[in-house]
Image: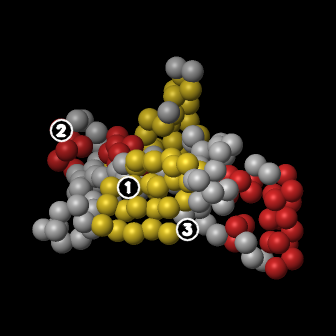
């Protein structure tokens, strides 16, 4: 678990992290990428001295860079996935779970660069307002022509698809 970014002046030099209870340090040869999500990234930056100077000083953190925006207007993309069964065998579940159809899908892509292997996971989507008084949409919906319990895992054995809803604004 990353504890803080270590700076040499304003240059990020290393990352301190905990592993099996011990504090360790990894030095960067070129750069450090912060990819902890909407909440953990600003937290790590603030613990490292990058953020609103007054807030950092209140917590006895040395200020590396006064960056008032770090930690403000946080929002995460909360996701609701709905798995639906399809009454016809037309989803990617059906192709991937059938050995012959799976091979034909690969051959079609190799020969013509067409078919299911040419599309992104989400084949269609839309933005909606949950309240007409909002200036911009606050919900995003995607359709995925397959279903699984968790992304990256095996597809369901039944014909199915996802409808995914994401919040996009506070």
Secondary structure type for disc 1: strand
* In the depicted structure, whether residue 111 falls above or below residue 98: below
Q: Which residue is mark 2?
A: 58
Q: Position of residue 50 (x, y in %)?
A: 33, 51
Question: Looking at the image, can residue 66 be seen?
Answer: no
Q: Given the current orientation, which residue lies at the most extreme top position?
A: 21
Q: Which residue is mark 1?
A: 166
Give the residue at x 52% y 53%.
162
Q: Please give left or right for residue 168 compared with residue 151 in the image.
A: left
Secondary structure type for disc 2: helix
* In the depicted structure, whether residue 8 falls above or below residue 114: above
Give the residue at x 35% y 68%.
127
Neighbours of disc 3 within 10 Å: few (<14), some (14-19), many (20+): few
Q: Earlier in the sequence, mark 2 or mark 1?
A: 2
Give the residue at x 80% y 72%.
109
Give the spatial CA distance, label 2 vs label 3. 48 Å
Q: Earlier in the sequence, mark 3 or mark 1?
A: 3
Quadrant holding the C terminus: bottom left
Q: Position of residue 15 (x, y in %)?
A: 51, 42
Proximity of marks 3 and 1: CB atoms separated by less than 8 Å: no
* In the depicted structure, whether residue 41 falls above or below residue 110: above
Give the total of numbered labels.
3
Give the residue at x 30% y 52%.
75
Q: Position of residue 114 (x, y in %)?
A: 75, 76
Secondary structure type for disc 3: loop
Question: Looking at the image, can residue 80 be seen?
Answer: yes
Q: Position of residue 30 (x, y in %)?
A: 60, 58
Q: Which residue is mark 3?
A: 123
Give the spatial CA distance, label 2 vs label 1. 35 Å
Which mark's residue is nearer the viewer, 3 or 1?
3
Q: Please give left or right for residue 50 compared with residue 131 in the image.
A: right
């Amino acid at each position: 678990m990353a504890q803080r970014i270590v700076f040499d002046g304003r240059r990020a030099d290393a990352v301190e992290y905990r592993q099996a209870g011990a504090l360790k340090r990894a030095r960067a040869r070129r750069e450090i990428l912060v990819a902890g999500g909407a909440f953990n990234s600003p937290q790590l930056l603030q613990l490292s001295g990058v953020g609103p100077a007054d807030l950092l000083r209140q917590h006895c953190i040395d200020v590396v860079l006064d960056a008032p925006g770090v930690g403000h207007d946080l929002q995460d993309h909360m996701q609701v996935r709905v798995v639906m069964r399809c009454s016809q065998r037309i989803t990617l579940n059906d192709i991937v779970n059938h050995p012959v159809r799976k091979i034909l899908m690969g051959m079609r892509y190799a020969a013509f660069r067409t078919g299911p292997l040419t599309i992104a996971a989400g084949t269609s989507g839309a933005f909606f307002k949950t309240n007409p008084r909002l200036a911009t949409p606050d919900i995003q919906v995607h359709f995925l022509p397959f279903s699984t319990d968790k992304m990256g895992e095996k597809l369901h054995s039944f014909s199915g698809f996802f409808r995914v809803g994401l919040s996009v604004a506070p």
